[in-house]
Image (cartoon, rainbow, N blue to C red):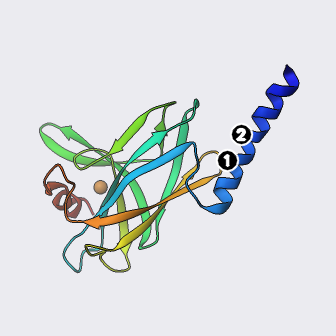
Amino acid sequence: MIRIGMAAFFSGVMSLAMAAEQGSQAAVLALENAWVRALPPGQPNTAAYLMLVNLSEEAIVVESVSANVAERVEIHTTRSVDGLMRMEQLQRLEVGPGQRLALAPGGTHLMLLGLDAVPIVGDAVQLCFQLASHSQVCTSADVRKNSDASGSQNGQNHQLHH
Ligand SMILES: [Cu+2]
């Protein structure tokens, strides 16, 4: 019994490590519907959104995020303080077992800071998530003007804060 348990444990660790090496999507954290907001030329920053899905039975911690078009990426959350929307930086994201965590306009989002060039509609941006487990999960994000659902007020908030 113990032997079988240990074997299962190690094979789980192995598949995580392999996924990290290949830079492919690890089976444990699925990244869905990633998109980056297209902005007019000359903007130094933009935002990215997606759905994180934890397919495992343990919490997954995202320690940092990178994008191939930006100097650095910050994790921000948007909160209403005295009727004003304010962005605050988060040091990490935690996705509970089986949880779906939406990063969406008006809420938690990724800020792409120090853009080489403003991504334009039709571009694809590579987003990579570094996990506390020392693996990395990447996805390709479409560049769009808006989410399917809602407006663009967030793009202007970013201007104020950066
Ligand atoms: Cu932000």
x, y percent for residue 100: 40, 36
- Residue positioned 14% across, 43% down in the render: 84
- Residue positioned 64% across, 45% down in the render: 133
Residue hosting label 1: 16
Q: In this rendering, would 124 be left or right of 136?
A: left
Q: Amino acid at mark 2?
A: Gly
Confirm or deny contact between disc 2 and disc 1 (CB under 8 A): yes
In the rendered view, tell whether residue 11 sits above or below residue 117.
Answer: above
Q: Quadrant of ligand 1?
A: bottom left
In the rendered view, tell whether residue 99 sits above or below residue 40.
Answer: above
Say the numbered circle drawn on residue 143. Answer: none
Residue hosting label 2: 12
Q: Residue furthest right?
A: 3
- Residue positioned 19% across, 57% down in the render: 157
Quarter holding the N terminus is: top right
- Residue positioned 71% across, 39% down in the render: 12
Q: Within 10 Å of the Cα at label 1, are there few (<14), some (14-19), or many (20+) other Cα atoms?
A: some
| Cα gap from disc 2 to disc 1, whole angstroms | 7 Å
Q: Within 10 Å of the Cα at label 2, are there few (<14), some (14-19), or many (20+) other Cα atoms?
A: few
